[in-house]
Image (cartoon, coloured by chain):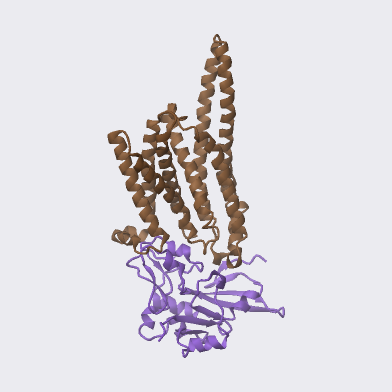
């Protein structure tokens, strides 16, 4: 029997950018104002046929198999759990922010009290057999969650159908456990608007 | 931006303290005895590194609120920072013991000085390695170049700090180390070359890092940080001290000639006071040069931290 490796798959063609996941996550995880464990980046793209389409790309911790945050954490507060996810033991965190600096996805933030936080794949729910809040609430079934090492899991089957799916910044070699369907296709299209995050402009449109 | 000016202060002080210690230990091999210069250096070194470390401790907010967590700092030896903590601690211990011996017994064991020098180089290099190990997220933080660049800058700022105080407190000893003027000419050039290489490599970062690398360099060269970069780092920190050092070299040659002329014509009274005035303004210019090096040394750390853009934000 293989080791467990929990992962998530997001089918961008099914994401309507409703932010139900963002809200469910905030409520479930007591995420402070201004911070997000998951969020959706929404922007317009120019399709190959010349028409403008809306792209919605949910983002969150990628739970990398070779996570730089775990490597750089001096106290061992950031660690890789037995289920393959990357977790933070906040009782060990000194708030040096090295993990925040080392993460190419920049998904970590510091709490008012100094400890660092991020998406846990809802560890408290999944260890009780529940789905992560964002997955359970997704209106379009865009998100699938499960064991990547179990070929019979929903996520493995869906990934196999999608020829393995895409990951963010594959060339950085971090082996993320967050997969997408349609990410490369989306990235290949020219961006034709500002990039919004939770309704606010995250990156202005420069034409 | 994850880190800010606080961390820049730490990187600056740790590098400065390391450079200062090495210079202090090198006075053991000075051409003429330089006991006061050594004392100046051995006081500045542990104080600078300790203050820098204190800044880190305060910046680590969760640890500052729960100090016992700092004992966990060496739990993960895969972390560069854990090794940094070890290196900083041992260096602090060695430099404090060395200072105590110097103050009590008036001299230090050469072996301990050498151990301290090796640790000092490790401290200076570590400040670069610390950023370098986050280089995957911030392409400007290049693991191949930053440690070397920070070591060179640590040498510069260390020399500047010691000379600044020596000029004021023990002016008779500023020329005890004959290699210092040469270092004042070589180090700024070396630093400029290393920064140029850093910018070139970052601007050409491949793949996912490409946009962040190019934008970080643009931030420095022509963007939001262009004025502090060109004025604060390049002009004040490198060009000005280099030019003053060069002028002093030429001046030193000229004043030797003047001394010969003066000896040949001992009646020239006013010439003597002119020479004294020239020496006074020379000292003022030297102080300006050393202060410029210190400003530049801080600007380097500040800019490397502040202008760096993460892969996701470009």
> Taking the image as drawn, is residue A30 in sight?
yes
Task: Tell which residue pokes out farthest to the bottom in this image.
Answer: A152
The one nearer the camera, B123 or A127, is B123
Locate residue B70 relative to residue B34 in the image: left or right: left
On the image, the x and y values in percent for residue A87 come to 39, 73
The one nearer the camera, A1 or A98, is A1
The chain assigned the colour purple in the figure is: A
Q: Residue at x 49, y 58 (%)?
A: B132
Q: Residue at x 38, y 53 (%)?
A: B87
> Taking the image as drawn, is residue B218 in sight?
no
The chain assigned the colour brown in the figure is: B
Q: Give above or below for B194 relative to A21.
A: above
Q: Residue at x 68, y 78 (%)?
A: A47
On the image, the x and y values in percent for residue A137 come to 46, 84
Q: Give above or below for B9 relative to A22.
A: above
Locate residue A14 relative to residue B163 in the image: left or right: right
Quarter-wise, where is residue A73 in the image?
Answer: bottom left
């Amino acid at each position: 029997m293989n080791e467990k490796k929990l992962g998530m798959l997001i089918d961008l063609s099914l994401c309507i950018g409703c932010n139900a996941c963002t809200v469910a996550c905030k409520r479930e995880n007591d995420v402070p104002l201004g911070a997000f464990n998951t969020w959706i980046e929404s922007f317009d793209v120019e399709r190959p046929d010349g028409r403008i389409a809306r792209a919605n790309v949910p983002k969150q911790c990628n739970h990398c198999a070779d996570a730089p945050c775990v490597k750089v954490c001096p106290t061992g507060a950031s660690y890789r759990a037995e289920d393959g996810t990357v977790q933070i033991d906040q009782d060990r965190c000194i708030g040096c922010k090295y993990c925040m600096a080392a993460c190419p996805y920049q998904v970590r933030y510091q709490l008012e009290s100094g400890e660092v936080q991020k998406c846990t794949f809802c560890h408290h729910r999944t260890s009780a057999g529940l789905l992560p809040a964002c997955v359970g609430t997704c209106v379009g079934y865009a998100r699938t969650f499960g064991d990547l090492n179990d070929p019979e899991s929903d996520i493995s089957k869906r990934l196999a159908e999608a020829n393995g799916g895409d990951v963010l910044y594959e060339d950085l070699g971090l082996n993320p456990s967050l997969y997408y369907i349609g990410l490369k296709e989306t990235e290949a299209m020219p961006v034709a608007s500002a990039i919004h995050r939770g309704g606010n402009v995250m990156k202005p449109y420069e034409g | 931006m994850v880190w800010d000016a606080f961390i820049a202060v730490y990187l600056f002080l740790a590098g400065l303290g390391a450079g200062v210690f090495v210079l202090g230990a090198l006075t053991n091999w000075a051409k003429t005895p330089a006991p006061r210069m050594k004392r100046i250096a051995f006081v500045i070194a542990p104080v600078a590194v300790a203050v820098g470390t204190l800044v880190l401790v305060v910046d680590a907010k969760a640890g500052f609120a729960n100090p016992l967590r700092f004992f966990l700092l060496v739990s993960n030896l895969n972390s560069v920072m854990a090794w940094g903590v070890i290196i900083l601690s041992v260096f602090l211990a060695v430099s404090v013991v060395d200072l105590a011996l110097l103050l009590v017994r008036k001299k230090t064991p050469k072996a301990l000085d050498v151990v301290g020098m090796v640790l000092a180089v490790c401290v200076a290099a570590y400040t670069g390695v610390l950023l370098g190990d986050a280089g995957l997220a911030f392409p400007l933080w290049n693991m191949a170049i930053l440690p070397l660049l920070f070591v060179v800058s640590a040498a510069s700022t260390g020399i500047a700090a010691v000379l600044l105080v020596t000029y004021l407190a023990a002016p008779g000893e500023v020329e005890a180390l004959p290699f210092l003027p040469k270092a004042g000419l070589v180090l700024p050039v070396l630093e400029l070359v290393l920064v140029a290489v850093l910018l070139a490599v970052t601007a050409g970062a491949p793949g996912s890092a490409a946009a962040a690398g190019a934008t970080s360099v643009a931030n420095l060269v022509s963007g939001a940080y262009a004025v502090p970069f060109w004025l604060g780092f390049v002009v004040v920190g490198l060009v000005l001290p280099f030019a003053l050092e060069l002028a002093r070299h030429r001046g030193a040659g000229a004043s030797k000639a003047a001394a010969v002329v003066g000896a040949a014509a001992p009646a020239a009274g006013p010439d003597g006071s002119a020479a004294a005035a020239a020496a006074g303004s020379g000292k003022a210019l030297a102080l300006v040069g050393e202060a410029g090096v210190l400003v530049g040394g801080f600007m380097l750390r500040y800019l490397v931290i502040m202008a760096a853009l993460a892969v996701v934000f470009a």
